[in-house]
Image (tube, rainbow, N blue to C red):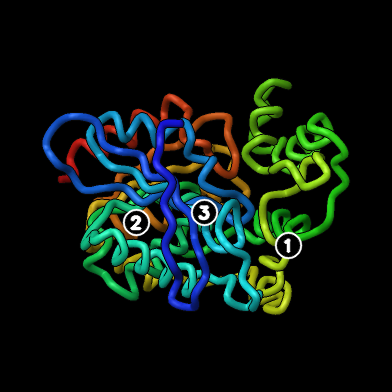
Amino acid sequence: MTYAERRWTSPDGLSLFARDHAPGPGPARLPVIAIHGLTRNSADFEDVAPRIAQSGRRVIAVDVRGRGRSDRAPDPMTYQPKVYARDMLALMDHLGLARAVFLGTSMGGLITMAVTALRSRAVAAAILNDIGPEVAKEGLARIAAYTGLPVETPDWAAAAAYVKSTNGVAFPHYDDAQWAAFARRVFREGPDGTPALDYDPDIAVPIRSAGKAALVPNLWPFFRRLARGRPTLLVRGETSDLLSADIAARMRKAAPKMAYVEVPGVGHAPMLDEAEARSAIFAFLADVP
């Protein structure tokens, strides 16, 4: 295990979990808070987090409430970015961190924008992984179609088949071994020994209660505040159905100083172990204190 296990308490009393990767040798640099996507957890960063840590930055990869080893919320309507953002600020207060670099994949990027709105000075720099202030309806509809629904996975082969069925469009080049590894990030072993999705199915409640309004979020004011106020990198999967080429182009126009990289042959969302993503991230971080 290359990380320490950390826990902190949310403002409403949940016990939340994070993987804390200690920095390698060298001068002190701002830490990185890594936040995963809607149905995922801190395991998504198991490749990139240790690499960033080796470069001299502490990396705290979180399990957002309702995912992984964090508590599930008794009120499912707390499963939304403004609440998640308060949880991240509670983490920073718990660890004594005034500022950090935020690395947000999909929902994690929305949380990063929300943190900026609540406490702008906390976000020293931001890496947005395949997410923007607006999303393509097709991609969000695809994700919403399976989020929170029960699945039958009697063994790990079935779990691998499930993640391939829901994510194959994003990673057409993956082989069986990669899908098996993917399943181990998304599922946990249940009490009866069979794989179970590692999130609370109630995370879908706010999405479904919002109806069509959930498919057209408009966070442009939050994005402009984020990208114009600090160094920002946008990572986009070339075939992403959530962050379209048009949305990315408008983001770049709104924030001309924002760094940008497109990961070829990958959809939503890059795993950040791709050579192009990794190179862009380390080049970006080299210029951040």
- Residue kind at label 1, given as amino acid type: Pro
Classify 10 Å Cα crowding around label 3: few (below 14), some (14-19), many (20 and above): many
Classify 10 Å Cα crowding around label 1: few (below 14), some (14-19), many (20 and above): some
Please provide percent x and percent y for residue 267.
60, 39
Rendered image quadrant of residue 93: bottom left
In primary-sequence order, the first of circles 2 and 1 is 1
Q: For the point 55% across and 63% down, which residue is it?
A: 65
Q: For the point 47% across and 74% down, which residue is it?
A: 82
Q: Nearer the viewer, residue 225 or 103?
A: 103
163 to the left or right of 260:
right
State the separation of the CA atoms marked 2 and 1.
37 Å
As displayed, is residue 274 above or below residue 190?
Answer: above
Q: Nearer the viewer, residue 282 or 50?
A: 50
As displayed, is residue 30 above or below residue 156?
Answer: below
Please provide percent x and percent y for residue 124.
23, 57
Classify 10 Å Cα crowding around label 2: few (below 14), some (14-19), many (20 and above): few
At mark 1, the secondary structure is helix
Which label number is shown at residue 201?
A: 1
Which label number is shown at residue 63?
A: 3
Q: Which residue is mark 2?
A: 253
